[in-house]
Amino acid sequence: MCAALLLAGCARPPKPGIDNIYRGLNERVPRLDPGLLSGRRIVVDPGHGGHFDGTRGQEGLEESSVNLGVSLYLWGLLHEAGADVYLTRSAQRDFLAGPDSTVAADLQVRVDMVDSIRPDIVVSIHHNAQPQHDPNKNAVETYYKMGDPASRDLAFGVHRHLIRNLGIEAGAVRPGNYYILREVDVPAILGEGSYLTHPEVEEKLRLSEKQRLEAEAYFLGILEYFSRGTPVIDEMAPAPGDSILAEVPTLVYALTDVGGIGIDPAGIEMLVNGAPVRAALDPAGATVRYRPPWDLPNGFYNVTLYARNLLGNSSRIHRRTFLLSYPAKRSVFSSYPENIPPGGGIIYVRARLLDRRGLSVAEGSRVGVAAWYQTSPGGGWKPLRSESEGQVNEVYVKGGVVEFPAHAPAGTSAIRVAVSPQGKLGVDGAPDGPVGPPSFEYVIDSSNAAVAPGRSVVLLNQSTRTPIEDARFSGSEGPISAESRCSRFVLTGAGAQTGEVWVQATGYRPTILTAGAPDTLFLEPWYGGKLLGKRLVINPESGAGAESAHGRLGLAGMYVNLQVARYLQEYVEAAGALVELTRRTEETPPDGDIVTLTNRFHADQYVEIRYRNGSEDSTLAVRTFHFPGSQKGRFAAEVIGRTMGEVLGVPAVSPSEMVTFPLQHTACPAIIVEPPSLDRIDEELRLSEPWYQRKQAFGIFCGLLRHAGVDSAATLHVVLAPDSVVEPSQESVSNWLVTVDDTWRLLTSPDGVARFEWLSPSAHRVVLRHAGRIVGPVEISLRSGEQRVLKIVIPPSR
């Protein structure tokens, strides 16, 4: 059958030209092997429908109608060939329910339908459009499920036959991240057979015979795919249901090449937690084995495996996750303080549990803990309980250790603690013998009791009351050293006990720890925590468009893109977000790598920054772009563009639709921000200066704040002036670094102004620095919606 298809595919391709578009089938449909498609389950998805028309041709032909026509013909061809075929829709309808009128809701119904059918493949039928409706643009584009080799094989097979039979010269096979591809768990492709915005294509596809022609081309591609066989992977060991393992497993998989001629020994690809490993295929070509090293650490493991057969087709990716959790065999204890203070108090206990190989037990393991105390050596043990919280009796392994407090009453001579990896421990009664179930014990006494050095403090998020584990400390009387112990920071150094300590944690407003203050300090997250923990990918544009962007004086767009992106990263991370830059040098990452990075990072937002050429007399304005039909993208583009325009003092053009690979295939809302043109010489000169690059980045940052829902803000204009006794020309007011709350930084412009937008309504601390000189701090309070001017006279330099 495969040979027949290859022979059929050797028909002479049509001569290029408009007259050959959809002229007729250029390949023979081969005689079918009755068993080739028998039992194969195939889902055909006619894109769009009902409320969603898709694109339209120049004369109004709706994509959704053409998609349905092609899909119905393809359904008939596959059904007659013996396949079990399913359509996601067979009429001009959508799948909206209730008040949800989004494209995502419609697509999710289709995904749910596919999941219930559990097909061998999914083929989604679409037709493309050129956003500017260029009548000369036409191509065949076939997208496959990103990162899935079986989908890639199907895409190449189908694409070849579309190119040969539709008479269209241009085309490409590309990885895609469309919703239907991303969310289904089987090999899937999305075909854009042609461009409806091409007048000749629109005219042809009004005819049912041309829709049938396209269906026949898809049919030939599907036949070729299945004729090459489809490898299938079945897991043998560990048992598929085993998810918690107490020994390093040997991974064993059975391979079958359905309809093919066997598995390629060089076609085995296995990854463990993303790293390739050497998995061996047995001589019979039926079993794959891999034995991880004996000292594999305890923890979660993700295994992916796929196999390629001798005719070049790949299996679906087989995935499994297991937790390796050797039981604990020994423990190492420590406490802070190391001894019980004379007046009692809280003792923080830490235990590292190790397995028989000497490795830490699995992260997240649940551990039972208990504690007792005695008031005199040799006296009886009494259960130790917290007066405020009750007895701590269950904790979880984090970073390889468990930590818990023991509240020692005054007069306590010793504390006995026990931890059990097998569950809760009882605390009633006198534990004179071993504590069951099997556990590890540790005794803390009061011998040589001394006041613990330094000062300890726990930092908590003011809103969520969760611990803050990374912070910086500086003292009013000298340097402060901070050591993290048992979920708290131990501060030592001059003034750690008696002076004021300045506390900073990324994502939180800095605060002062005063002498005598409680040991628990609550930090206020910036902007109510609206950006705390959010994930942002920033792409400083590179590639052909950026490489050709230069100002009249030579300033490169790629350079400005990267500088502004770095400043934006500083601002967003200071607000608590997690940021990935797609590049940090002048190297150009491929579009596919950008999309892969964004999706693996599970980004909440993708922002591309690009400075391009316009015309010298063009109006300075901020332009933004989003993918056609993306409601979330359009909203983000409108809010961020408008806000940036307000910060820069220029208009913002309404968002425009644009098709680029990253906009099209990132799973999160994605936009492009294009600030004013490089072709204006005055703008080019400003963009070469760091103060203006920072201002540009700050404008985008303010837009991200507004988009995140921050609506209560104030504005502070810091205006510098030289001392009246100094000639203005002798004292520069430009490029002073102005810092608000030790967090937000801008450089003053040539006229000595730094404008901070979107500050929280509260008290703020302003410090200025320039060439080793420091002015401030200056305290100022702002109310919601207020615009204040803070004029600072610069003292003469010595």
Image (cartoon, rainbow, N blue to C red):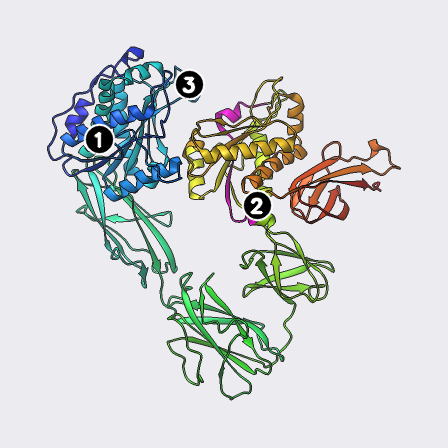
Q: Earlier in the sequence, mark 3 or mark 2?
A: 3
Q: Which residue is mark 1?
A: 222
Tag 1, which secondary structure?
A: helix
x%, y% of residue 476?
A: 73, 58
Q: Report which quarter residue 651 is drawn in.
A: top right
Q: Earlier in the sequence, mark 3 or mark 1?
A: 3
Of the 4 image quadrants, the one containing the N terminus is top left
Q: Residue at x 56, y 73 (%)?
A: 347
Q: Along the line of sight, which residue is nearer the eye, 155 or 555? A: 155
Q: Is residue 527 above or below residue 101?
A: below
Can residue 540 be seen from the camera position used here?
Answer: no
The span shown in magenta is: 529-550
Residue 133's disc is 3
Q: Is residue 638 left or right of residue 181?
A: right
Q: Earlier in the sequence, mark 1 or mark 2?
A: 1
Mark 2 residue type: Glu
Q: Is residue 1 above or below residue 302?
A: above
Q: Is residue 206 magenta?
A: no
Q: Report which quarter residue 558 is drawn in.
A: top right
Mark 1 vs mark 2, CA separation in Å:
48 Å
Q: Is residue 675 above or below residue 374?
A: above
Mark 1 residue type: Ile
Q: Which residue is mark 2?
A: 573
Tag 3, which secondary structure?
A: loop
Q: Report which quarter residue 18 is drawn in.
A: top left
x%, y% of residue 658?
A: 46, 26
Mark 3 residue type: His
